[in-house]
Structures are given as C-alpha cells and as structure tokens.
Image (cartoon, rainbow, N blue to C red):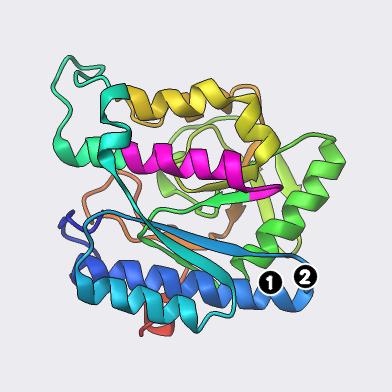
Amino acid sequence: MLEQNKKRLFEKNKSNYTIRSLNSIIKSLNEAKIYLPKVNFDIIIIDHNSKKEDLEKFKVCLNNSGFKNSIINLNIQDFVNSINKIDAKNVEVPENQISNMSNIHKSFLLGKNQCDDLIYFVEDDYLHEKDSIHEMLFTYERISSQLNRELILCPSDYPYLYTNLDDTSIFLGAKKHWRKIDETLCTFLTSKIMLEKHWEKFISMCQFKHDPFEKPLHDIYKTEYCLSPIPSLAIHFTNINSIYGLSPNVDWKRIWDENEI
C-alpha cells in the first residue's frame, strides 16, 4: 500500500514506515526465537506495485533475518470480480481500496491454506516493540488455556477505544495486562481454527466495503474474545488526522529510532 501518501508523524516517505515496520517485526521474531526455539516462523510479504529500490530493501532485511520468508506479488485481477464496486454508503469504491481489499483477501487465503497454527496479519505501518511477538504468543497460550477457547489479539492500544465508557475484562498476559475490546483495524493475531470458523465474515470484508470497513471483524468480536495490551506492543503510524491516534504511554520516538535501516 505504498501509494498512500497521507501526512504522518515525522513526515517521512511512506516506504520509510514500511521498512521500519518490517525491521521491527524481524527484531521481535528474533527475540521470540530465544524463548521459543522450536517454533517455526514464516514471514510472507504481499506486495503491490512497490518501487524496485523498496523491494530490494525488503529482500535484504528478509535475507538477513534467518527466518523462512517470501515476497508474493499481488494480482488484483484474481479478486476484482468478487468485489462489489458500490460501498455501504452507495459510493463507488476507489481503486486503492480495491487494491487493499484484494491484499487482505490474499492474506486470508494464505493464512487458511498455508498456516497450521497461529497467524499474524500485519499492515505495513506498525512499528513493534522488541518483545511484541514473544508477549503475544505467551499471552495467547496462557489466556486461551484459561478460557478454553481461541482468541484474537491486537498488538496496539488504540486511544479512541478509551473515549467510550464500556465495560471490559482484564487479563494477565506474560508481562502485560490485556483488556477485552470490541474493535480493531486489520492487524491482529489469531488461529487457523478461528479463521476457518468465521471464514465467511472475514472474507465479506474483502468483497464489500462496509461502514466502517472493519465491521465484519467487529461482528466477530461480539462472540469471541479480542484483546489488546496495556500499554501498547505496536505503534500504528497512521496519518496524523486519524481518529485512531497514537497509542498512549509509549515513547514513539524511541521505537522509530530503534528501527532505522
């Protein structure tokens, strides 16, 4: 999604946020590997129209990571006929949104067909703390066993979710507390079991532009546990006018500097 050029914190080129996000994920995977040496990790990038120099940077990071990895070029034509061109507001869906929906659809298919256990879907502008993946995996194991059910974990502590006085539940993770939430964007960790259980709802997000876009996810969260950490494990460097905002009680500048390539 490198064609998006909205104003962001630090006002760098979009590719700068993407490469730092990838670097932060690789660092976090290496940290997790220390505690989970027998777990197999696989990094898959779904790319659409990135510049050649950006792709080369991605490849260097992946080749130096030590993890199984691949870059898949998105073919929008594989999905475009399944997308309703008129959205929930009766407005024509723009081309960049069709690209986004196709990308998400491809991600879900890869998760369903190639993954055996847990799947982490990540958008391209989330910078992660070094202990993010370790914390998420241990937390998933602990709370899933406690509740005897599959989960969905969102790595970001979105500030807009504090604007409503909603009841919630608090759980103890590995090193952080986690709270039950009812909304996320498209970055989350879950299991293949959960993906298959709610497959039609997941895919509906790729076929029709709802209002809000993530409404099918929110419908899933009405019956399933979706949790986010306190404080945040990943910072969403969205455009500065976004209602989602930057997660509180986190040193954004430190995370940004730590992941420079």
Mark pair 1, 2: CA separation: 6 Å
Position of 166 relative to 59 (above/below):
above
The dot on residue 82 is none
- 163 to the left or right of 82: right
Position of 63 relative to 29 (above/below):
below
Where residue 108 appears, x then y in whole percent?
50, 39
Position of 90 relative to 59 (above/below):
above
- 3 to the left or right of 166: left
Quarter assignment of residue 167:
top right
The three-letter code of the residue at mark 1 reads Ala
Disc 1: CA contacts within 10 A as few (<14), some (14-19) or many (>=20): many
Where residue 256 appears, x then y in whole percent?
37, 77
- 182 to the left or right of 238: right
Check disc 2 and report the residue beneath it. 36
Asked if the residue under mark 2 is in contact with the one under mark 1, i.e. CB atoms within 8 Å, the reply is yes
As helix, strand or loop, the secondary structure at mark 2 comes to loop
The residue under the point 33% across, 61% down is 237
The three-letter code of the residue at mark 2 reads Leu
Residue 246 appears in the rendering: yes
* Helix, strand or loop: magenta stretch: helix
Q: How many marks?
A: 2
Quarter assignment of residue 124:
bottom left
As helix, strand or loop, the secondary structure at mark 1 comes to helix
- 220 to the left or right of 91: right
Where residue 164 appears, x then y in whole percent?
46, 33
Where residue 175 appears, x then y in whole percent?
73, 65
Position of 92 relative to 227 (above/below):
above
Give the magenta range: 101-118
Quarter assignment of residue 240:
bottom left
The residue under the point 35% across, 46% down is 244
Image quarter of the C terminus: bottom left
Check disc 1 and report the residue beneath it. 32
